[in-house]
Image: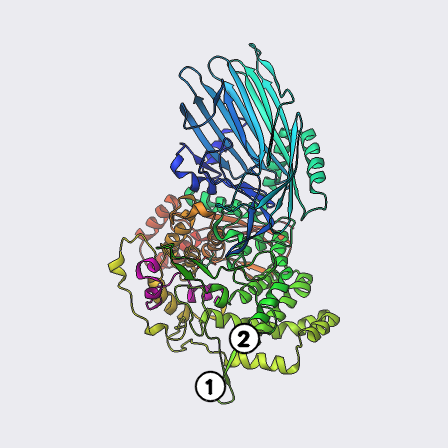
Amino acid sequence: NLDGVTLADLTRAATWRVVEPVFDANRQKHRETIFTHGNGYLATRGTFEERYPGDSQATLVHGMWDDVPVSFTELANAPDWAALEVWVNGTRFDMQTGVVRDYARSLDLRTGILHRRLVWEPVPGQAVELVFERFASLADEHVLAGRVQMTPLVGEAEVKVRALLDAHVENQGILHWNPVSQNVGAEGADLVVRTRKTGKTLALSAKVNSYVVGTSTGAEAPTTNGEGVDCPGCVGVIVRGKVGTGETFGVEKVMGVFSSRDTATPLEAAQDRVRAAAEAGFERLRQDHVRAWEDFWAGSDVVIEGDDEAQLAVRHGLFQLRIAAPTHDPHTSMGAKTLSGFGYRGHIFWDNEIFVLPFFTFTQPEIARNMLMYRFHSLPGARRKAAGNGFEGAQFPWESAETGDEVTPTWVPHFADPTKLVRIWTGDIQIHISADVVYAMHQFWQVTGDDRFWAEVGVPVLLETAVFWGTRAEEEGTSAEPDVTRFAIRDVIGPDENHDHVDNNQFTNFMIRWHLQLALEMLPWLAARDPARAAQLTAELKLTPERLAHWRRVIDGLIILHDPETGMIEQFEGFYGLKDVDWGAYAGRTKSMQELLGIEGCAEHKALKQADVVALLCLLGEQFDEKTWRANWDYYVPITDHEYGSSLGPSMHAWAACRMGQPEEAYQHFMRAARADLLDVRGNAGDGIHAASAGGLWEAVVFGLAGLRVREGEVSVKPNLPAHWKKVGFWVTVRGVRRWVEVGGGWGEEEKRRKGEKEKRGKGEEGKRRVSEVLGFVECRLVQCYT
Ligand code: BGC
């Protein structure tokens, strides 16, 4: 059953579809994550409609925070909307009962539809084809839809389906909902629930439609007989019918969903929406949804020719980012595990600004703006954090949720022995996040040219966080240079979390210096554009001449451990004195260096969890000369835990390797990131998609392999593709102009042949020409598509 699929689709399918060809009960936690689907309002893990004990069913809705012990707050797992329980001839459908064959489940990244087809024989001699489909509409984020179609392949089948909305869900053992109200009718049901601590209401309203298709050989029209499910917290409609061989019995469930964050009357809104959706019908909803996905890809796709695995991984990553990015909501942003699992409880980290946002900034600036506005709206929490620590201005939290207050847990169970607790210091002292947020806002301004955003949102955040840095910098007497006061940033954690409580982490210090310089440049910029606003900020933030002079002194005197002779940047004070690791002795390891050496042991060694100085080079690369790049790359890359350290590492190393002109090495790092979720190489994909890794793949392709740069609105590329990548193409929207950028640099068969021929021709005039012709293979094309 090709279901309207053309041959061309099939040949391209490998790079558009994630397929599970066999059902494997033991791998479901991973599969549920990678089959997560959604629409930017919510996302739902790829659990099965019929539900199994031990599955990790979850729908996470943006902004539906509820309190939890220790971790402060988490996104409450919403009622299960996907549930469709099926009985055939009295036997409940369950893939562990009877025989399952011709199974295939796939997530179509182009259309955002989760699809499953299989043949089930509950008892020998009875075979039924079952096709499930479901999606959260990208065209209307308040609409959800699911369908099951059952076709007996032999004999007749009496079919029963229970289409449910079920609030008996949990966040790994924690319950978040109190039931508020429920209704059950002949063709639909409503369920309203409220979070236990924060009092946020969520309403779901479902309508169920059933039908029979095919020549009638004794089919009975499906009937609901007014029968329904009406248990506390669980409602639904029961549909029964009878179909003969080759006839299809279908049950469609469409739903409206609204929360008290959207409207004062979420139930009414959900009922209205589902009424309209049911009138439009499942097929129409599906078409609108598919069209919305087409629009997304038409501005966001990345094409990699010559490497289907890389291609699929990038598309899957972008798909996962899109479904977790708030389309219309400027009060929320993306957690480190997107909306696809319970890992990190939905909390938002620097992952978002440094790894995820560039993709949206360059392709979907409206969405990027929402995510940046979230930080603006969370300034009150950031102010409280700064004040609580005895500083002025705004200090963004390491882990952020609804209010911008710090929500990093202080203690968590030890990974090796959960009966012991480990103190987590990141919430106290991983402070570079305040500069990272500004970095993302500044990048947004540079790429979009949105002066209004920069004036109204970016510069105020820049200045208020600069006030924080000015008070956080510790004055330590005069430095070697006369008239320069030394400033230190002591007791921090840099991006490399294997080393905590360090002094003058250079990623942090360089970012602070960049931040303060930008603040000093932008205050006059704002004064020229909007004098009243500049005056207001100057008054509110007490940007006195003394304070600005203080910032200048911090810029001049901040401890920078960059040796001009060698180019080396010492990651933090004393790093060079740490013990060396005999990396050879750990060859073939399957654990992180931190697990192997212990938390304290690792801190004593030169073993990095992830890029730190190398991350600095990627972000502020233009400040650094070739010598600095080379020296630090050569020094830090061999002492980084690429396989089992942070999932944020590989994509950044791929990007940096391209900058070093090492595309084959870049490819190794790139594939480590590409496999983090699809192949679960780190073993923790079950907790949710690694958002930073997914966004980092885009950065590695665009900034690294294609070498895209934007300077004052001008776009240039400097490709560095691995040999087997024939071509890379991607969309970027810069200053309102959408462009398709394509770089081709592969040594394909034809190129190899031509290169070989030229080499045979030898040196002399021919030889000289050869160089330019070979370079000619590195074809860079920039095509402006439309404005
Ligand atoms: C990484 C951090 C990251 C966090 C959330 C940690 O393991 O070291 O850089 O922000 O995970 O992804």
Give the number of the disc on residue 274: none
Magenta extent = 593-621
**Crowdedness of circle 2 by 10 Å Cα count: few (<14), some, many (20+)?**
many
Residue 492, horizontal then vertical, whole percent: 46, 70
Residue 208, horizontal then vertical, whole percent: 63, 27
Viewer-proximal residue among 583 and 663: 583
Q: Residue at x 38, y 78 (%)?
A: 565
Q: Residue at x 48, y 46 (%)?
A: 172
Judged from the image, the secondary structure of the residue bearing numbered disc 2 is helix
Q: Residue furthest bottom?
A: 482
Residue 383, horizontal then vertical, whole percent: 61, 67
Give the vertical position of 9 relative to 775 (above or below): above
Give the vertical position of 541 relative to 400 (above or below): below
Q: Residue furthest left?
A: 585
For mark 1, what is the residue? 479
> Mark 1 or mark 2, which has the lower sequence index?
2
For mark 2, what is the residue? 472
**Crowdedness of circle 1 by 10 Å Cα count: few (<14), some, many (20+)?**
some
Confirm if mark 2 falls within 8 A of ligand 1. no
Residue 313, horizontal then vertical, whole percent: 45, 45
Viewer-proximal residue among 333 and 700: 333
